[in-house]
């Protein structure tokens, strides 16, 4: 494709990639218009995510953008280059904290330099409040930008801290962790179908006590939600079927009312929707950005079903009951009847909010346990993103540096990509959709440890089953040796190479990283004959001695993790996470960072969206939608800040 390349710009620890929508031109005009309208609804949530990630983020972004645009063609210096990098990081992370590690990143330019540029910038383009002076704005924002002690972590999960008071995410105001937990505990009942209390609100305390500011059209974030609703209604004009129309109508009702009961009705209809080639996710969904796992960040994705690749996931979902029945967990915790488990391979058509620029490659929704139990779940693996990652990694020297021997490298070269995709399918489609809570167990029983335990449960499910002969019988793998590629790369990542994402002296905070570390270190301790860390040629490597015994280990740990989840055993969750998932071996960390730095690989990657352009005839009628892949990272971010500035 003209002007298309997967690998793009690099800055800080980030590389920007492009993804290609291969099947877009095969869509009908009506389908293209449907994707276009859904994409607009996806992009209008951007400012919500910025605000959720920190109450000063939007003003800081707008201040930096005003200064950058004013001086980008006139000032050339190391400090201005540092300002540009800092702004790019703010764009990437939807704020001033690292998108993955959640620690605050600090500028490499001085307060004096930025102050001078601000005073030379037209006051009319600065983000000033009514009646506020430039100096007042500087006094408010500079400590937030430059002082490492102010808002140091967006999401703090350090055991023993007040996680609400020590996290700078913008979901709570004037409340403590205990007050939050007591407020929502008082709302919960024994009804298994109760809503996900607190999912779409900010909890604040004033003279009248605690109250929720609900995120809805006539409430908090109303201006952005109004635009999302507008484009969802426009999308209704182009739906592929009546089921899609019903789903959009319920989503609009939810945005307008803020009712979590309507959100659950929407989620039920969405999970039942299988017709059509186009689907989407739009709303307050995942709770990883809240240290207590209650409040959801805004995200959006538009998806086009990959009809050929979906045959793989269809085989998995069609056999979901077999996998559940043969799971190594206690029979009390298995679903007797697996309902509505579906999985598709899709191509991303537009990313937004908490899924942009950095995004997941697999998604399983809805998150409500009772909906999963009664109606099932939908999973997607996003093929054009995994393809872009794979192409960007070719020839970068990573395997040569960290994989122990040529035999293992050859295994990974041959089977790694397929097994990674299969593990994602098993994780999303079967892992998250498996198991059940015992009667009376709250979905929030594991509190701040819930996300890590849930991700570990899904990963272990994938690890256990990717080595099962059933995958050969189903034609999903053609070699009984293939799974070994996945076992090696998973343990290497959990024990060693994911440490490149951690700053020296820091512990592991992010739920997915904790999950991988927990599994790998538990296995290393309990199955030390099967896997070990060894020194070879002065370097540390993972060596696997017995792949079959490893599978037994994954089965044992899966059984325990499912028990913790099903029984709501908070004490056991805390113990296993804190023991295996948090601490970092400083010497190994230093070694991994040194080896990795020589490869000059960016540890984090994110994506540019294609630009969708309407083609009209002389009468103004839309006759086509074209994709433009030529926009640069800076151009896209500045355009989004202008076109989708809803708050």
Image (cartoon, rainbow, N blue to C red):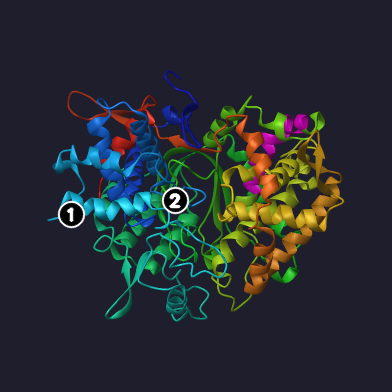
Q: Which residue is mark 2?
A: 104
Q: Is residue 411 magenta?
A: yes
State whether the magenta stretch is mostly helix, strand or loop.
helix
Q: Which residue is mark 1?
A: 129
Q: Secondary structure at mark 1?
A: loop
In the figure, is residue 305 to the left or right of 33? Answer: right
Q: Which numbered disc, 1 or 2, marks the residue that appears first in the sequence?
A: 2
The residue depicted at 26 percent of the width and 64 percent of the height is 219
Q: Is residue 622 magenta?
A: no
The answer to whether residue 48 of the structure is visible from this angle is no
Furthest toward the left, the residue is 131
Q: Where in the figure is residue 613, as x and y percent of width and height?
A: 30, 30
Furthest toward the top, the residue is 2
Number of marks in the image? 2
Mark 1 to mark 2 CA distance (whole Å): 25 Å
Q: Where in the figure is residue 508, as x and y percent of width and height?
A: 59, 54
Q: Residues within 10 Å of mark 2 (few under 14, many from 20)?
A: many
Q: Residues within 10 Å of mark 1 (few under 14, many from 20)?
A: few
Q: Where in the figure is residue 267, as x and y percent of width and height?
A: 45, 60
On residue 119, the disc is none
The residue depicted at 54 percent of the width and 34 percent of the height is 602
């Amino acid at each position: 494709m003209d002007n298309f390349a997967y690998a793009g710009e690099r800055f800080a620890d980030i590389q920007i990639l492009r993804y290609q929508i291969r099947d877009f031109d095969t869509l009908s005009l009506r389908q293209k218009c449907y994707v276009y309208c859904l994409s607009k609804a996806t992009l209008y949530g951007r400012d919500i995510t910025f605000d959720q990630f920190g109450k000063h983020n939007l003003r800081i972004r707008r201040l930096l953008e005003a200064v950058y645009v004013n001086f980008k063609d006139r000032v050339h210096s190391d400090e201005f280059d540092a300002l540009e990098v800092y702004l790019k990081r703010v764009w990437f992370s939807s704020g001033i904290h690292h998108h993955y590690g959640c620690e605050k990143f600090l500028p490499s330019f001085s307060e004096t330099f930025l102050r001078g540029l601000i005073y030379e910038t037209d006051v009319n383009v600065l983000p000033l409040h009514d009646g506020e002076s430039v100096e007042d704005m500087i006094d408010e924002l500079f400590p937030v930008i430059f002082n490492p002690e102010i808002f140091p972590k967006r999401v703090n999960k350090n055991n023993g801290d007040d996680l609400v008071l020590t996290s700078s995410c913008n979901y709570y105001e004037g409340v403590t962790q205990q007050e939050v937990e007591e407020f929502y505990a008082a709302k919960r009942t024994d009804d298994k179908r109760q809503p996900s209390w607190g999912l779409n609100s900010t909890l604040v305390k004033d003279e009248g006590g605690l109250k929720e500011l609900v995120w809805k059209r006539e409430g908090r974030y109303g201006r952005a939600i109004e635009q999302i609703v507008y484009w969802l209604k426009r999308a209704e004009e182009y739906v592929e079927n009546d089921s899609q129309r019903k789903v959009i109508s319920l989503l609009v009702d939810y945005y307008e009312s803020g009712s979590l009961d309507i959100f659950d009705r929407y989620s039920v209809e969405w999970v039942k929707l299988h017709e059509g080639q186009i689907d989407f996710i739009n709303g307050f969904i995942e709770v990883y950005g809240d240290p207590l796992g209650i409040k959801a960040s805004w995200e959006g994705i538009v998806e086009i079903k990959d009809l050929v690749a979906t045959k793989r996931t269809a085989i998995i979902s069609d056999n979901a009951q077999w996998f559940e029945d043969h799971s190594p967990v206690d029979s009390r915790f298995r679903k007797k009847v697996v309902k509505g488990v579906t999985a598709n391979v899709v191509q991303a058509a537009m990313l937004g909010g908490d899924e942009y620029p950095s995004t997941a490659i697999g998604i399983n929704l809805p998150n409500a346990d009772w909906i999963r139990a009664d109606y099932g779940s939908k999973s997607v693996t996003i093929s054009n993103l995994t393809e872009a990652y794979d192409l960007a990694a070719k020839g970068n020297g990573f395997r040569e540096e960290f994989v122990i021997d040529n035999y293992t490298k050859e295994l990974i070269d041959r089977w790694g990509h397929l097994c990674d995709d299969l593990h994602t399918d098993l994780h999303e489609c079967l892992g998250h959709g498996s198991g059940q809570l015992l009667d009376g167990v709250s979905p929030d029983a594991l509190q701040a440890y819930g996300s890590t335990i849930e991700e570990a449960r899904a990963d272990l499910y994938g690890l256990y089953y990717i080595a099962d002969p059933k995958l050969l019988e189903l034609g999903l793998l053609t070699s009984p040796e293939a799974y070994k590629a996945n076992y090696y790369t998973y343990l290497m990542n959990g024990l060693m190479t994911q440490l490149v994402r951690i700053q020296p002296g820091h512990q592991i905070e992010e739920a997915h990283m904790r999950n991988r570390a927990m599994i790998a270190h538990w296995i290393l301790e309990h199955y030390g004959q099967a896997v070990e860390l060894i020194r070879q040629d002065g370097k540390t490597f993972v060596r696997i001695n017995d792949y079959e015994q490893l599978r037994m280990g994954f089965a044992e740990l899966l059984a325990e993790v499912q028990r913790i989840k099903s029984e709501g055993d908070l004490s056991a969750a805390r113990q296993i996470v804190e023991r295996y998932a948090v601490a970092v071996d400083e010497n190994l960390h230093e070694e991994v960072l040194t080896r990795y730095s020589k490869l000059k690989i960016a540890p984090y990657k994110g994506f540019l969206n294609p630009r969708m352009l309407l083609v009209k005839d002389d009468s103004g009628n839309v006759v086509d939608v074209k994709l433009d892949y030529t926009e640069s990272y800076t151009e896209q971010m500045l355009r989004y800040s202008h076109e989708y500035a809803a708050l």
